[in-house]
Image: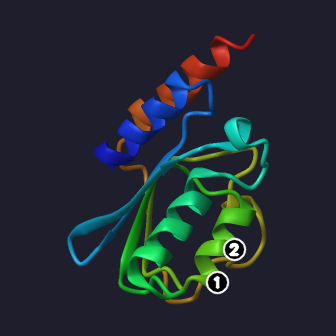
Amino acid sequence: MEKALEEARTAFAKDEIPVGAVIVCRGKIIARAYNLTETLNDPTAHAEMQAITAACNSLGGKYLDDCTLYVTLEPCVMCAGACAWAQLGRLVYAASDPKRGYTLCPGNILHPKTEVSAGLLSEPAGQLMKDFFAGKR
């Protein structure tokens, strides 16, 4: 999660919403990403989406069942859906997203075999988000 926080700090420095993601497969980081929605003028350019694309390219396939996604903010419904389609093995997120997180939706959006852990380094991840939006107000 520390590496995902580094990605989030990069996003912050580039005036992007500070969300970072890292995908690990068999103990090795195969993808790193941060939000690029402003840079690319693309509402789908979330950190998770960028990381999933990079990881699939790295592995040469569309399934991430042997992988763990570490992300600094609870994924939105779109990103959770992408995780499901990729059959992600494990999701670990830091801060919860009480406004747009996937857990607000009824039912399980993720693949049934995806393991989920929440709260790892939630304090620094949440503070980074607060600092970013405080500067916008």
Q: Residue at x 53, y 26 (%)?
A: 12
Q: Residue at x 49, y 77 (%)?
A: 56
Question: Can residue 115 be seen in this snapshot?
Answer: no
Q: CA distance from mark 1 to mark 2?
A: 6 Å
Pointers 1 and 2 in contact (C-beta within 8 Å): yes
Quarter assignment of residue 131: top right
On the question of residue 95 being in view, the answer is yes
Residue located beneath label 2 in the image: 81
Q: Quadrant of the C terminus?
A: top right
Q: Is residue 109 above or below residue 126?
A: below
Total count of labels: 2
Residue in view at x 49 percent, y 26 percent:
128
Q: Is residue 37 above or below residue 27?
A: above
Query: What crowding class fits label 2: few (fewer than 14 Cα within 10 Å), some (14-19), or many (20 or more)?
Result: some
Q: Is residue 52 left or right of residue 109?
A: left
Q: Secondary structure at mark 1?
A: helix
Give how far across and how far down residue 37 sits, in percent: 71, 43
Residue 112 location (% of width, % of height) = 57, 88
Picture coordinates of residue 33, whole percent (x, y): 48, 51
Residue 96: x and y in percent read 57, 47
Residue type, label 2: Gly
103 or 7, nearer to the observer: 7
Residue marked by disc 1: 85
**Which secondary structure lies at badge 2?**
helix
Give me the residue at 59% from left, 74% from top: 83
Looking at the rendered structure, the kind of residue marked 1 is Trp
Kindly identify which numbered label has been placed on residue 51: none
Farthest left residue in view: 27
Q: Position of 5 compared to 49: left or right?
A: left
Crowd around label 1: few <14 · some 14–19 · many ≥20 (10 Å): some
Question: Quarter of the image holding residue 62?
Answer: bottom right
Colour scheme of the rendered structure = rainbow
